[in-house]
Amino acid sequence: MSTYLINHLRIPGGVPTEESLRYLEQVQATTEAYGAKWLAVDAEVQVIEGAWPGSVVLIEFPDAETAKAWYNSPEYQAILSLRTAHTINDLILVDSVGPEFTVAGYAQQIRTLLGQ
């Protein structure tokens, strides 16, 4: 089951620093050995509801363990501060749903947990 890394990224002042650009130049190479697929990088997201200041990055990994292995890898840790010292980030991992998933079934699971 695929796992998606989602980064809600904000650049203070709106202009990337030299360090942020160095990060961008190096980060993709750190993901290649982990089977990552870069699915979206957008500086101008289209907000249709609510607010989303900043950009989004979406990367697909084969599974959560692989995504965590990449994040904790020496190669990525060596460049991580180039991003975190110069940008504001909310970084999450979320697993994809299986082929049998339905939203109604998910609601029923919640009802069961709530004793309804």
Image: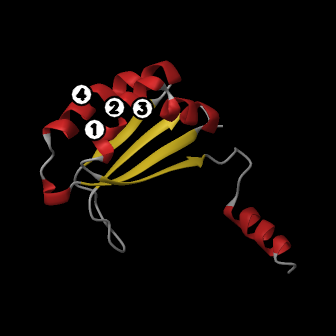
Compared with residue 103, is residue 84 higher up or lower down, i.e. above or below? above
Disc nearer the start of the sequence (2/4): 4
Circle 3 is placed at which residue position?
A: 77
Circle 4 is placed at which residue position?
A: 25
Which of the numbered marks, if any, corresponds to residue 82? 1
For image coordinates 44% across by 21% down, the residue present is: 32
Q: Nearer the viewer, residue 77 or 16?
A: 77
Q: In the rendered structure, which amino acid carries the disc numbered 3?
A: Gln
Q: Is the Cβ of the residue at disc 4 closer than 8 Å to that at disc 3?
A: no
Q: Nearer the viewer, residue 51 or 83?
A: 83
Point out the frontmost of discs 4 and 3: 3
For numbered disc 4, what is the local secondary structure? Answer: helix
Circle 2 is placed at which residue position?
A: 79
For numbered disc 2, what is the local secondary structure? Answer: helix
Q: In the rendered structure, which amino acid carries the disc numbered 1?
A: Leu
Which of the numbered marks, if any, corresponds to residue 114? none
Q: Is the Cβ of the residue at disc 3 closer than 8 Å to that at disc 2?
A: yes
Point out the frontmost of discs 2 and 4: 2
